[in-house]
Image: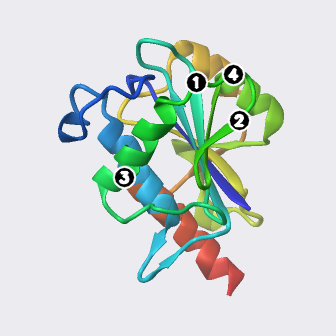
Amino acid sequence: MKRFLIIGHKAVTEGGFSLNDMPGGAGRMDVLCRCVNSCFFLSHDLRRDVECYLLLLGEPNPPKTILIKGNEVRYLNPDERSAGSLIKKALQVVCGEEFIESTKGIYIRNGGLERLLNEIDFSVLDENGTDIRSVEEIPENYILSDHMNFSEEEESLIKDLPKISAGPKVLHADHTVIVILNEHDRREK
């Protein structure tokens, strides 16, 4: 199973946002939706061996973690509004410290980065990391940030994790996911 954790620094943590204003009123939820689509969609198929964690840090109740499982998810279509609608439904669920399913294959809980780091061994996708094409055994689990850099607190939590680069250029988060998955595809043949 490959896992991606995308940190949404301004992504709202309640389900009252408008699907027509995901870049603004929802705290750049559009970036997270594009990452979700990049994690799962192939041409006429879905990656079932991927899980996507969205760590939402915006107002009013951060942090919240949404988990989308490729082998279970239903009702996800390859457009931002579809992913946004499912995230919005998840944020309307009253949740606690354990994951609770909001719709098929989509789960939500309270909790943040430190807890996830204690549960899963991640590598950090970082433009200054080791190029993925030069790594003999590529990792299965990755952390990346949305359109913003990691905060000082996040940097201190991830400072000792392996750092992997998707290539020589700085890419958008959703494009980085695609490059990493493509490298996995090439090596799994």
| Other-residue count near label 3 (Cα within 10 Å), few / some / many at <14 / 14–19 / ≥20 | many
Q: Earlier in the sequence, mark 3 or mark 2?
A: 3
**Label 1–label 4 contact, CB within 8 A:** yes
Q: Earlier in the sequence, mark 3 or mark 4?
A: 3
Q: Amino acid at mark 1?
A: Val
Count neighbours of disc 1 (C-alpha within 10 A) and say few if under 14, some if 14 to 19, many if 20 or more: few
Q: What residue is disc 3 on? A: 34
Q: CA distance from mark 1 to mark 4?
A: 7 Å
Residue 64 vs residue 86, the one in the foreground: 86
Q: Is residue 173 visible?
A: no
Instruction: From the image, state whether disc 1 or disc 4 is nearer to you.
Output: 1
Tag 2 residue = 99
Q: Amino acid at mark 3?
A: Arg
| Foreground tag (1 vs 3) | 1
Tell me which label, 1 or 3, sits earlier in the chain.
3
Q: Amino acid at mark 2?
A: Phe
Residue 187: percent from the left, percent from the top?
67, 79
Residue at image mark 4: 96
Residue at 34% of width from left, 36% of height from top?
29
**In the rendered image, which residue does mark 1 sit on?**
94
Task: Say left or right for 10 vs 178.
Answer: left
Give x and y (percent) for residue 112: 64, 23
